């Protein structure tokens, strides 16, 4: 074989492997759309009705915006976070549980391609659900666009970070109970205290300092800034945190795969 053709062949094989994982993940999302897409739309509609409409009338304006308009970006981001995470943790753990992850591990695909494929699937689901929740939000309020590039960058980076988090959770999980531990005891509290429903300026000084340690607060506010032009945090710092988390978690996920962590049980 011509040695000059080997790199091109390897690149082609990696691309085919990556594309195959993505197609499989996309097919899974669409096949069970009543579980992957519809629940977030219903939940978001309920949030808008209960928090935005009923409670929002008593809360009044938030940072100069109607309360329903203020919480809309947060609700969209909350859906992106939970779905990006859930898609990867359930899919990759299913691959481990069903033993077909072994077929990928013995294939010529490097581990970083496997990680990228599953993360890509999680990002797709997060973006799909985010688009659906955005459509729901438009039934209840008006969403101005202050900076479209900030919106796109914030939602993609956030989806990548939590898709990687879901992958790492799946690597360590040994049963279905452990798949649900992180979303219940870590992800949900951080999300609800992440500035989705309120501005941290309303909190006491000590609570504000605690809130700033929550990475989801920075993600939500960067996304909100893209729509409304207001933020409780430094947007540059928020993107620095998101970018650093994405790079660090990807490196960690690949390192765990290279070590065979969670694959030999």
Image (cartoon, grey):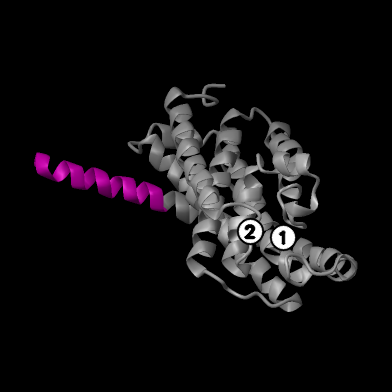
The answer, for residue 122, to whether it is visible in the render is no
| Image quadrant in which you'd find residue 6 | top left
Q: Position of residue 50 (x, y in %)?
A: 87, 65
Q: Nearer the viewer, mark 2 or mark 1?
A: 2
Q: Position of residue 147 (x, y in %)?
A: 52, 69
Q: Position of residue 158 (x, y in %)?
A: 56, 51
Kindly indicate whether the residue at mark 1 contacts the one at mark 2 (C-beta within 8 angstroms): no
Most extreme residue toward the front, as rendered?
205
The answer, for residue 204, to whether it is visible in the render is yes
- Nearer-the-camera pick, 50 or 146: 146
Please give the residue where the numbered disc 1 appears in the rendered image: 40
The part of the chain drawn in magenta is 1-19
- Badge 2: residue crowd in 10 Å (few <14, some 14–19, many ≥20): some
Asked whether 13 falls inside the magenta stretch, the response is yes
Asked whether 133 falls inside the magenta stretch, the response is no
Say which element carries label 1: helix
| Image quadrant in which you'd find residue 180 | top right
**Is 216 left, or right, of 117 in this rendering?**
right
- Nearer-the-camera pick, 103 or 21: 21
- Nearer-the-camera pick, 130 or 75: 75
Q: Overall secondary structure of the magenta stretch?
A: helix
**Is 171 left, or right, of 116 in this rendering?**
right
Query: Which residue is rendered at x = 61% and y = 34% of the image?
Result: 169
Please give the residue where the numbered disc 2 appears in the rendered image: 231
Q: CA distance from mark 2 to mark 1?
A: 25 Å
Query: Which residue is rendered at x = 85% and y = 71% of the image?
Result: 53
**Is 169 left, or right, of 43 in this rendering?**
left
Query: Which residue is rendered at x = 68% and y = 55% of the image?
Result: 78
The C terminus lies in quadrant: top right
């Amino acid at each position: 074989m011509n040695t000059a053709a080997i790199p091109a062949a390897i690149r082609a094989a990696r691309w085919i492997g990556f594309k195959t994982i993505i197609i499989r993940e996309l097919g899974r999302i669409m096949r069970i759309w009543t579980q992957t897409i519809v629940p977030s739309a219903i939940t978001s509609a309920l949030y808008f009705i209960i928090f935005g409409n009923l409670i929002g009338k008593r809360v009044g304006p938030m940072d100069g915006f109607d309360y329903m308009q203020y919480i809309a970006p947060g609700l969209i981001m909350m859906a992106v976070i939970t779905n990006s995470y859930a898609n990867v943790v359930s899919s990759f753990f299913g691959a481990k549980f069903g033993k077909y992850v072994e077929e990928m591990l013995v294939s010529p695909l490097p581990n970083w391609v496997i990680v990228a494929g599953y993360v890509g699937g999680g990002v797709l689901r997060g973006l799909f659900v985010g688009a659906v929740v955005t459509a729901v939000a438009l039934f209840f309020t008006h969403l101005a666009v202050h900076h479209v590039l900030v919106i796109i960058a914030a939602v993609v980076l956030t989806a990548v970070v939590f898709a990687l988090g879901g992958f790492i959770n799946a690597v360590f999980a040994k049963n279905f109970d452990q798949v649900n531990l992180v979303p219940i005891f870590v992800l949900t509290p951080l999300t609800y205290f992440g500035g989705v429903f309120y501005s941290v300026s309303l909190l006491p000084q000590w609570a504000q300092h605690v809130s700033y340690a929550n990475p989801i607060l920075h993600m939500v506010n960067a996304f909100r800034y893209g729509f409304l032009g207001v933020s409780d945090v430094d947007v540059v710092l928020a993107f620095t945190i998101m970018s650093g988390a994405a790079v660090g978690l990807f490196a960690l996920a690949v390192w765990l795969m290279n070590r065979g962590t969670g694959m030999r049980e």
